[in-house]
Structure formats: C-alpha cells, structure tokens
Amino acid sequence: MRILIAEDDPAIAAAITDALRQGGHAVDHVANGAQADIALRDGAHDLLVLDLGLPGLDGSEVLHRLRQRGSGVPVLVITAREGLNERVRVLDLGADDYLVKPFALAEFEARVRALLRRSASKGSTEVRIGRLRLDLPGHRAWIDDSPLELTAREFGLIEALASRPDRITNRAQLVEALCNWDQDLTDNGLDIAIHRLRRKLHGSGANVRTVRGLGYLLEETADE
C-alpha cells in the first residue's frame, strides 16, 4: 500500500515513516498543507496520515478539499488538539479515524492496518488466486495453509498486481507502487523482483504473466 504522511514535526514524521516502511508500505512525506493538497490530487495513495496543525494550509482544509473532490481515500488524523468537540468536527469533515499526540507507535500501526483492511477488503478479507491466499493489509501470504515468505519488495509487487484483478499493470505503475519519492528502482531491479516472485509462486496455481509490450498480469494457472 502507498501511504502519504502530512506532518511537520520531523521526529514524529521520521518515526511513523520508518515504522510503515518496515511494514512493507511505500511511504511519501510532506511537511505542509499545500504540498499535501497537491500530492493528493493524483489519487495515487491508499491512505493519508494527516496532522491538523500543518503550516501553509491547515490540515482541516486539506481534508475538506480532499472530500470536496469526491476522494474516498481513508484518512487517519493525528493531532495534539484534544476534546470531544474537536474529534466530532474532524470526523464530520470526513476523517476515518483520530489519534491524539502523543501516541504509542503500536496503536498507530494497528489503526493503520485497520483502515487499510477496511478499504482494501470491500467485504472480503482475502484475495485468492489458485492456491495462493493474500491478506493485503496484513502483508501476509499463504500457499494453501503454508505461509509464503516474501520480502517487502516482493509483497509490494504482488500487492500492486492483485489490486488490479484481470487488468494489466505496466512497468511504470509497478515502479510507482514499489518506491517512495526519495527512492529509485532500476529496470534491472524490477526484473529481479519479478523473477524472484515467480520462483516463490511456483506450484501455487498463480503466476505473473508478461504481456509483451504492455506489462504484467497476476493470473491463475494450472497446478504444475
């Protein structure tokens, strides 16, 4: 999943960015409201972690503009502003959850997982392809009942493909899903990740098929 963090406190931003990246997510960070508003316009993110006290453009206005555009991206508000009236106001603006600073990192991660699971599942908690089972928000995979060990990059790759069922995903879309703004992924690096993922999927009834000139497709295959 790709997550945007809009937070102007460097220490908080660094801590939650590191935690989310260690969890296998692609994470982008902005430090003011205007940058957040611009970043959200391309619809590339699966979750927004939003501080209300942003410079330039208040987080409440960022949230208001996001919902005015009709975006349904989940929003987790993190703020030092307390009180029932403030929580009600922010939830009425369109936030999905609310966390008051200071907070425990474990609780933050649990709330992120819950929001991503709610957004991704749309009534189904798993993706199944052949004998392969995927829990996308939980970053877990199995072949039948045996856990499938995947690196963060490999899971990001299969997640990007599984999120577009029956549709071809091109190389640029895969690179965008796998990388943060401050990272690069070479063509060779992408090819290596695809090769390793295919090897781990061998015998699962699922495979990454190359559609020449167009991209890649995660599809069910006959058991080998």
Image (cartoon, helix red, strand yellow):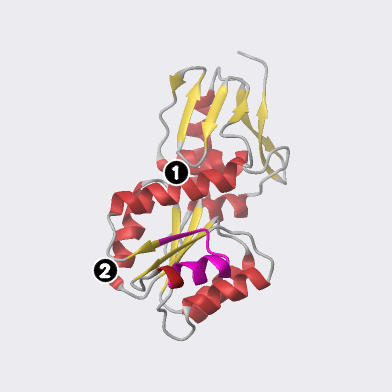
Q: Is residue 169 visible?
A: yes
Give the residue furthest to the bottom.
56
- Nearest the eye: 219 or 125: 125
Magenta highlight range: 86-98
110 vs 166, nearest the viewer: 110
Q: Residue at x 35, y 71 (%)?
A: 82
Which residue is the site of mark 2? 11
Amino acid bearing label 1: Arg
On the rendered image, what quadrant is the C terminus found in?
top right
Asked which secondary structure carries label 2, the reply is helix
Examine the rendered structure and indicate whether residue 138 appears above or below residue 173.
above
Position of residue 71 measured from the top left corner of the image (x, y, whole percent): 65, 64
Report the label total: 2
Q: Indicate the quadrant where residue 99 lies.
A: bottom left
From the top left corner, tell me how far across and down residue 153 is, in percent. 44, 43
Query: What amino acid type should be assigned to the residue bearing mark 2?
Result: Ala
- Image-based side of 72 in relation to 100, left or right: right
Does 214 sit above or below residue 27? above
Instruction: Write down the residue under mark 1.
Output: 153
**Where residue 219 appears, x then y in whole percent?**
67, 30
Q: Eyeballing the image, is 117 above or below 197?
A: below
Query: Is most of the magenta stretch helix, strand or loop?
Result: helix
Task: Tell me whether circle 2 and circle 1 mark residues in contact (CB < 8 Å).
Answer: no
Q: Is residue 51 magenta?
A: no
Whichever of labels 2 and 1 marks the residue nearer the N terminus, that label is 2
Residue sitting at 36 percent across and 59 percent down? 17
Quarter holding residue 151: top left
Which is closer to the viewer, label 2 or label 1? Answer: 2
Image quadrant where residue 180 sits? bottom left
Which residue of the protein is positioned furthest toward the top in this rendering?
A: 224
